[in-house]
Image (spheres, rainbow, N blue to C red):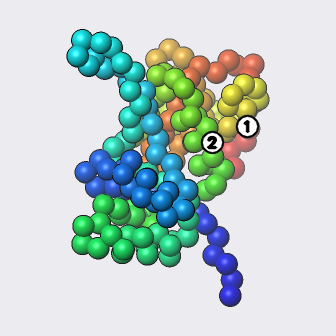
Amino acid sequence: MDEVPCQWFALRATYNRSLKVQAALQAVGIRTFVPMRRVRRKIRGRERVLTLPAVGNLLFAFSTQQRLYEYILSEGDQSMTRFIWDRVSRLPLTVPDKQMEDFMRVCAEPSEDLVYVKTPDPKLFQGARVRVLRGALQGVEGRVVRIRKSRRVLVDLPGLLSVASTYVPVGDLQVISDD
């Protein structure tokens, strides 16, 4: 019997319960990722920095499709988890490993300056395709864009979400060909 390889699946958690679903999936041994953002909020007169999900209902799971189906079915009628479907292929939406790895590395930056883009402007994809050569994002591939007067690397998960890194100096970028 052939072993089915694990893939990154995009999942939707109902009613902004992505952190609860993440904890439940991790409890059964499934690797997950929820994109987070840092925000400043005033709570009882004191300013605090909170880490919140960037998109309240989005998470990613690294598993086989069958194992995720079994988890969703085990939740019964009160299921909090749904697959996000690719409208063209009519299959659950998957993200290639390299693209997901780059996305997670950019999201992991401990900065309030990350920019999450849900519905990207086509102008954002006119920038050159680049690879970061030095620094914390070494090896990350994306498009160079200008957002908030800073040069950033935009990593896109088509149909889902894009994230733009913090400022990246020109000397740390290498232009690569569009594949």
One can see residue 21 in this view: yes
Callout 1 amino acid: Gly
Residue 164 placement (x, y as % from top left): 52, 31
Indicate the position of residue 63 as horizontal and vertical percent values.
56, 65
**Picture quadrant where residue 133 is located:** top right
Q: Nearer the viewer, residue 173 or 109?
A: 109
- Please report whichever mark, 2 or 1, sits nearer to the chain's N-terminal start: 2
Q: Secondary structure at mark 2?
A: helix
Q: Position of residue 8 (x, y in %)?
A: 55, 59
Residue at the limit of the structure toward the top, as seen here: 45
Q: Residue furthest bottom?
A: 1
The residue tagged with tag 1: helix, strand or loop?
A: loop
In percent of width and height, residue 84 lies at 39, 61
Q: Which residue is mark 2?
A: 102
Residue pictured at 63% horizontal, 42% vertical: 102
Residue indicated by mark 1: 139
Q: Is residue 142 left or right of residue 119?
A: right
How packed mark 1 is, by other alpha carbons closer than 10 Å (few <14, some 14-19, many 20 or more), is: some
Which image quarter: residue 78? Answer: bottom left
Image point (54%, 62%), residue name: 29
At label 2, counting other C-alpha atoms closer than 10 Å, the crowd grade (few under 14, some 14-19, many 20 or more) is: some
Q: Nearer the viewer, residue 24 or 38?
A: 24
Seen in the picture, residue 97 relative to 51 is either above or below; the reply is: below
Q: How many marks?
A: 2
Q: Residue at x 28, y 55 (%)?
A: 14
Using the rendered image of the protein, determine whether residue 121 is visible from the camera's viewpoint: no
Q: Are marks 2 and 1 in contact (CB under 8 Å)?
A: yes
Q: What is the spatial separation of the Cα atoms under label 2 and label 1, in whole angstroms?
A: 8 Å
Numbered tag placed on residue 112 in the rendering: none
Query: The residue under label 2 is which amino acid type?
Result: Asp
Quadrant (top left, top right, bottom left, bottom right) of the N terminus = bottom right
* 120 and 56: which is toward the camera: 56
